[in-house]
Amino acid sequence: MTLFLIVTLNGLTLAALYFLAASGFSLIFGLMRTVNMAHGALLLLGGYVGYTIVDATGSWGLGVIGGGLAAAFAGAIVQAGVLGRMQGDELRQTLASIAISIIMADLMLWYWGGLTYQVELPDALAGGQRLPVLNVGYANIRLALMGFALVVGIGLWFLIQRTRFGAVIRAGVDDQDMLRALGCPINRIFVLVFALGGMLAGMAGVVAASALSIAPGTDLQFLLSSLVVVIVGGMGSIGGAALGALLVGLAEQYGLAYAPTYGVVFTFAIMVLVLAVRPQGLLGKAEQ
Amino acid sequence: MKQALILVPLLIPPLVLNDFWLTQVATRSLILGIMALSLSFLATYLGVVSFAQATIAGIAGYTIAFFGPNSVGIGVPLPFWISIPLALSLAAISGALVGLIARRSRGIYAIMITLAIGVAFFYFTRQNYTFFNGWTGFSGVRAPEIAGVSLRDPLPLYLVSLAVAALALALVSGFVRSPLGLTIQAVRDAPGRVLALGISVTTPIVTAFAFSGLLAGAGGILNVWYQERVSSFSVGLGPIIDILIISVIGGLRHPGGAFVGAVVFVLLETFAVDLIDRERFNTLIGVVLLLIVIVAPGGLQQLAHDWLARLRAPDTNEKSSV
């Protein structure tokens, strides 16, 4: 029973991370129809920059913000410099973002080397907590991670449902041409949303580097999880990203605990099952 | 068939090239070209870009390694005339399964799903030791020997690869003119109308994927003979991207271009060491891909076409004025 509880908690932790990574991916896809294959690379960049900042200043909070900003900046450059020029040609955008992700991954390998990095935790997050009711010990950082994902999720919901900027994004998802006709500077909005998605990825990278660790290859791992999460949850829907992340995170941890050789198969089976029953994803809108 | 003629001058290289050029450059280009052809075929005639082609090639490669001589002591040795058809059928079946999973998805959705399939398979081979021997995979895989001649020797491997490439191109051009091939193209252009005519959309899609799986499998078999090993790295993101890059360089919508792209890719890979640090090859290939996507989205084949058309244009103008 204890094992089951711990595995469930681990699954929730992983789901929180996956949600942080996938929400930016899904946001970008929902508005621009761009499959940003460089999303994993942005996440890794955020993680590395966050590590470097924490290493230099000793402040974890600064690291998370710095990592997020670095990835946001990189994301904005990617959209403004390359992908924005091919708006509407989705295949070309996908290929270009793959090229960018290859270049970024290689340059990061050059600069940071092939080492595994783990961000040092502040005192408040180090150590563990004896959980009431469940009566199992659990690492503070992992609990904080779940809290962080909740805050980000609610924040995103608020931004998209309750602010003017969010209204513009929602309008853009529904009818881009109309928005353009109304005189909305849609290209600037695209760059902003890309930066926002990059920011989420970058922060997820720093958090991943704190709760777990990061190394070359982490980018691929999170790109895959983001892909599966949005395929399962529904593309372009934040709620879908949350639901997909929960399913995938839990499935992965249960798989690891109870069938170690076939852990990946669970994730994959969920994806195939959802595709067979609801190709647009659990909470996605049908493709036009 | 016209495209298969591209391959005829390729009978000359063995006469003039040394073993390094023949094996490392010519044969490798052919093998990569066959795998990339399986992707270009899908992209051209079904309009779907699949990232699972390296995976399917890997499945064929793993089959050959598992049912053949290898140095890790896993698997059941079978004679090659059983293991080769087995590998090809498994590749075609895997292709059909990928098609079945992705059948309702088009464009970027299909890319995401096939990429997820490919990467999931990569992680699966790392976790599974019963069939895939985990991280390390199979080494010491030997190509069959016929009448005392190993197919791994430079000249036989080159000729076999060339023959397979020619056959693959001929099969593609024959297949796309068959009724089924035409249905596939109809599904690409107007799935709704095909359905309205009372023709199932699923069958053509799955068949197209199975056929491309067969091509990828043939490339995968040659590749495992060439590399003499197959491991999780053979189905990782690296090979997936390599095949994509080759197709894009040659032109995604030009099946024959796959071989042009393969030659460019292999030459870059072989000689980039002299230009830049070997470690930075990925940056170079990333930049090449980015440039192609930005400057010539139709690939080199399309670029050559356009140039030729431009060269010819003044001539036709003169004729029309006369």
Image (cartoon, rainbow, N blue to C red):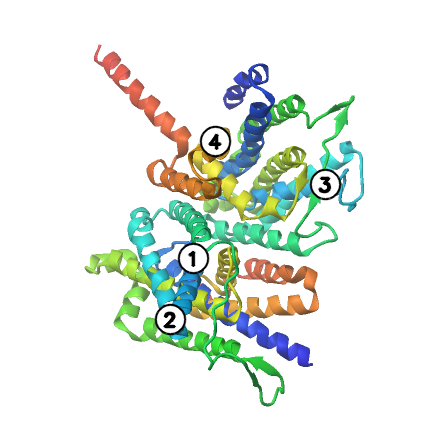
- Counting from the top left corner in percent of width and height, residue B2 is at 50, 21
The kind of secondary structure element at disc 2 is helix
The kind of secondary structure element at disc 1 is helix
Q: Which residue is mark 4?
A: B271
- Extreme left residue here? A183
> What residue type is disc 3 on?
Ala
Quadrant of the rendered image containing residue A235: bottom left
The kind of secondary structure element at disc 3 is helix
Dot 1, crowdedness within 10 Å: few (<14), some or many (≥20)?
Answer: many
Q: CA distance from mark 1 to mark 3?
A: 35 Å
> What residue type is disc 1 on?
His
- Counting from the top left corner in percent of width and height, residue A226 is at 49, 61
Dot 3, crowdedness within 10 Å: few (<14), some or many (≥20)?
Answer: many
Q: Which residue is mark 1?
A: A39
Query: Do pointers 4 and 2 mark residues of a single chain?
Result: no
Q: Which residue is mark 3?
A: B65
Q: CA distance from mark 1 to mark 2?
A: 27 Å
